Each structure stands twice: as C-alpha cells, then as structure tokens.
Amino acid sequence: MSIIVDVSLPTDDGATCPSNACGTGSATTAGSSQARTFDLYRPSLVHRMAKLFQRQKLGKAVLEFAVSMTTGLLISQLQGLTHLQASAIVLALSLGFTSLWNGMLLHGICPRVASALEYIGMGIILVAFFGLVSLFLLPTLGWACWLCCGLSGLPFFLRLVLPRADEVASSAERLDQGIV
C-alpha cells in the first residue's frame, strides 16, 4: 500500500524538505507536478532514539560537554589522577567525541550509520563522565556513581528494546487487516 504526497514535506522542526532527503521512498513525476510515493510499512532509516537526539540537539550538547571535560581533565591531570586513570578517561572522551562528530557529519549520507555512531559516542562519554566522577569520590562511594551511570543509561536501553505505543497500535491494526 502506498500513498502519493506533495514534494514539499514538513519536517519535525516545521521547515519543509523539497528534495529526496526526507523520509524514504522514490521521487516520481506525474504530469507537470512532482510527487513522492511512500511505503506506509517501510521503517524509517533513522532510529527513533536518534530522532529524539536530533530534535533536542543532544549530540551537540554532549560534544561541547566532552570538549570542556577533556580540557578540565588535562589541566588537573597533574594534581591527583594516576597516569593510567587519566589516560583511560581521555581515551574514552576522545573516542566518544570522534563518534559523535562523525555521526553528526554523516546524517545526510548514511542516516543509520550516523545514528549508531551518535548513540555509541554518547554512551562512551556517559561512561567516561561517571568514571571521572567516581575517581574523586571516596572508594566506598564509587558504587553510587556507577549506579547513577546505569540509571542514566536505562532510558537509552529501554527506548532501544521496548516498542513505542504507536508502533504496537499500528502492528495490531495491520494484524487485524490481515497484513503481515
């Protein structure tokens, strides 16, 4: 089942997308007007978690946070951290930064790869942040920091694993109609 839609499609932020960059489907010409055919049951190229990150500009915020945290860590490295601890955290921040940066730049070319890179980068920076914070706590309180890390990562995991309510409803409608 497919529908025909006008070329100028509104995006999530209210702008219009006149090219083939929005959604999935193929461009067709019918007479003098251009139209796009969308397959109603084809999944989006961009993961729903990545769409949330893009709308809230979380990738850029985490990227800015990683740069400032790395700078602060390098300044304070001489004062209290061992070389191995500081190196591990700086390496994790560098990997997270690289992953986020490449993810943001690849959105127009490879949306799925870009979404995965951003997701991985945010996860690495999350672990690096809580790892850094746990180093400055008393050893008996380090578990609390890692608990916070796990609780912060829980929504990411749940959004990946659990289906959204609208997806469950559309699946039920397709089953009722006999469409698999």
Image (cartoon, rainbow, N blue to C red):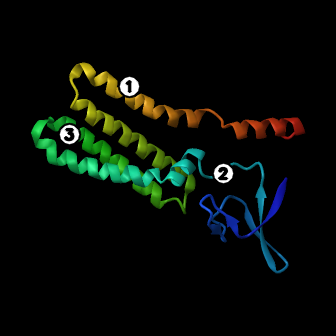
Q: Nearer the viewer, mark 1 or mark 2?
A: 1
Residue 73: numbered disc: none
Asked whether disc 1 touches disc 2, contact meaning CB atoms under 8 Å apart, the reply is: no
Indicate the secondary structure of the residue bearing disc 2. Answer: loop
Circle 1 residue: 147
In the displayed structure image, the side of residue 162 where residue 94 appears, left or right: left
Residue, x 76% and y 58% (percent of image)?
38
- Other-residue count near label 2 (Cα within 10 Å), few / some / many at <14 / 14–19 / ≥20: few
Query: Is 90 rendered above or below residue 135?
Result: below
In the displayed structure image, the side of residue 154 where residue 132 appears, left or right: left
Circle 2 residue: 44
Amino acid type at image mark 2 = Ser
Which of pointers 1 and 2 lies earlier in the amino acid sequence?
Answer: 2
Asked whether disc 3 touches disc 2, contact meaning CB atoms under 8 Å apart, the reply is: no
Q: Nearer the viewer, mark 3 or mark 1?
A: 1
Circle 3 residue: 86
- 3D distance between C-alphas at marks 1 and 2: 33 Å
Picture coordinates of residue 172, whole percent (x, y): 80, 35
Picture coordinates of residue 85, whole percent (x, y): 21, 35
Indicate the secondary structure of the residue bearing disc 1. Answer: helix
Extreme residue in the left direction: 79
User: Quarter-wise, where is residue 73 in the image?
Assistant: top left
| Location of the C terminus (image quadrant) | top right
Amino acid type at image mark 3 = Ala
